Amino acid sequence: MITQMEEQVFDRIESEVQSYARNFPVLFNKAKGSYLYDEDGNAYLDFLAGAGTLNYGHNNPVLKEKLLAYLSEDYIVHGLDMHTVAKRNFLNMFEEVILKPRNMEYIMQFTGPTGTNAVEAALKIARNITGRTNIVSFTNGFHGVTLGALAVTGNSHHRDAAGIDLPGATVMPYDGYMGDGVSTVEYMEKQITDSSSGVDLPAAVIVETVQGEGGINAASFEWLQELQQFCRKYEILLIVDDIQAGCGRTGTFFSFDEAGIQPDIVTLSKSLSGYGLPFSVVLMKPELDQWKPGEHNGTFRGHNPAFVTATAALDHYWRDKTFSNEVKKKGDIIAQAFDAIADKHGSEWFTTTGRGMMRGLVCNSGKLADAITTEAFKQKLIIETSGADSHVVKTLCPLTISEEDLRKGLDIVAAAADKAVAEAKQKGNVA
Ligand SMILES: *Cc1c(COP(=O)(O)O)cnc(C)c1O
C-alpha cells in the first residue's frame, strides 16, 4: 500500500517542470505490451508509448529475454565507448539488416543517450564541415531542448525557457505551411540566392519527414525530393531528424525509405533501443566523419544493455517486410477511423494528417483536443496532443498493438470526439 503521504512526495520534492504527469495523474506501476497498469492493477491502453519510444510495446518479451540473459551473465553494462561484444553485435546487425539492403553507406556515431544529444552532434558536424554557421529549420519543427537543438526548434514555449538568444538558425516554412500550391522550397531558394534577403547560406537544413511534436504534419515525398535537390544544388547538408518518425513509426525503418532521398546526416533515438532504454546515434556519409578523436565527448555514448535490445529488435522485426506491412495496415486503420470522425462532424471541426502509424486528428481548437484526450483518459485510454495549440490528437501506439486493441482505442477516441463536439455546441462554441 502506498500511503497518501508517500504519494505527495511528487508535490513535495519533484520539480514543477513535470508535464505528462499532469495530464495522466495516476501512479503507474507495471506495463506490458500496449497497456500500462496503475498501482491498483487498473489497465490503461497506451496510445502514447513513451512518446514513441516503445514502438515494440512495453517489456517486449523477445527483447526482455535477451536483456535478462545479458544481465544475469555479468556482461558489461557500462564501458564508456570502449569496444564490447554487445556493440560489435549491434553494429554488425545494423549493417546487415538496415544499411546493406538499402545500399546505404553511413558511419555511425554514438552520442549521449538522448535525442537532443544526437541533434547537437549533427549540427556540429554540419557547421565544422561546411565552415558555415547558419542552419535552416522549419516551422513547427522540434529537435530537442538543449541550446543548439532549441535554436532549430519552433515552439515558443520551449524557446522562451532558454533564457538566452538562440542564434545560428533561420526558420523556413514547412511543406504546406503557406497553403496548397505554394512551393516553400522555391521560397527558400529565393531567400538563399538573394544577397539582400538577410539569410546566410546555411551549413545544413534539418527536417522531420513527419513533424512529431509540431502537429503530425507530413511532408510529401515530392517536397522532400525538391528539398534534397535544393540542398545538393547549393552544397547544403540535408539532416533528417528521424528520432520520432524513424524506427518503423511511419511503416518503414527510416521514415524516408520510400521518399527517394538519401540524407547526408540522420539522427535516431526514441525507439532505437526498442525497450525504452536511452540510446541515440548519428548516421553520416563517410566523407563527413572528420571528427578528431574525443572531440565530441560524453560519458554515456552507447549503453550496452541498449545495444542488446536494439540488436534483438532489428533481428526480430526488420529482416523482411512482414512487420513493415503490418504497420502500414494498422496505419490505414487509424487513418480510416480518423477520416470517419472528420466526415461525421465536418471539416469545420476536424481534419486528419500523418503517415503510417503516426497519425493526427486535427481539431479546430486546443480546447476541443483537450476535451477529447481528457474524456479518453476517463475511459482508460492514454493519448496525447501535439501542435502549436496542442490541437492535434496524435496516435503513437505501439506498432505491435493488436488490431483488436487498436480498434478499441480508436472507438474511444470517436466516442470522445462525439461528446466533445456535442458539449462545444451546447456551450455555443459552434465551429
Ligand atoms: C523527441 C525528439 C527529439 C529530442 O529527443 P530527446 O530524447 O527528448 O532529447 C529530437 N527530435 C525529434 C524529432 C524528437 O521527436
Image: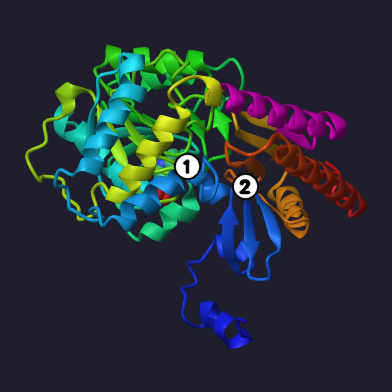
Determine if residue 418 is in view. yes
Ligand 1: quadrant of the figure: top left
- Where, by quadrant of the figure, is residue 228 drawn? top left
> Mark 1 sits on what residue?
62
Is 138 contained in the magenta span?
A: no
Does residue 254 lie above or below 412 as drawn?
above
- Mark 1: secondary structure: helix
Q: Nearer the viewer, residue 20 or 219?
A: 20
| Crowd rating for badge 2 (residues with CA inside 10 Å; few <14, some 14–19, many 20+) | many
| Residue 119 in view in this figure | no
* Residue type at the position of mark 1: Val
State the residue at coordinates (65%, 42%): 392
In this rendered view, identify the residue nearer to me: 376 or 192: 376
The prevailing secondary structure element of the residues shown in magenta is: helix
Q: Is residue 327 magenta?
A: yes
Pointer 2: what residue? Answer: 34
**392 relative to 262 in the view: left or right:** right
The quarter of the picture where the N terminus appears is bottom right
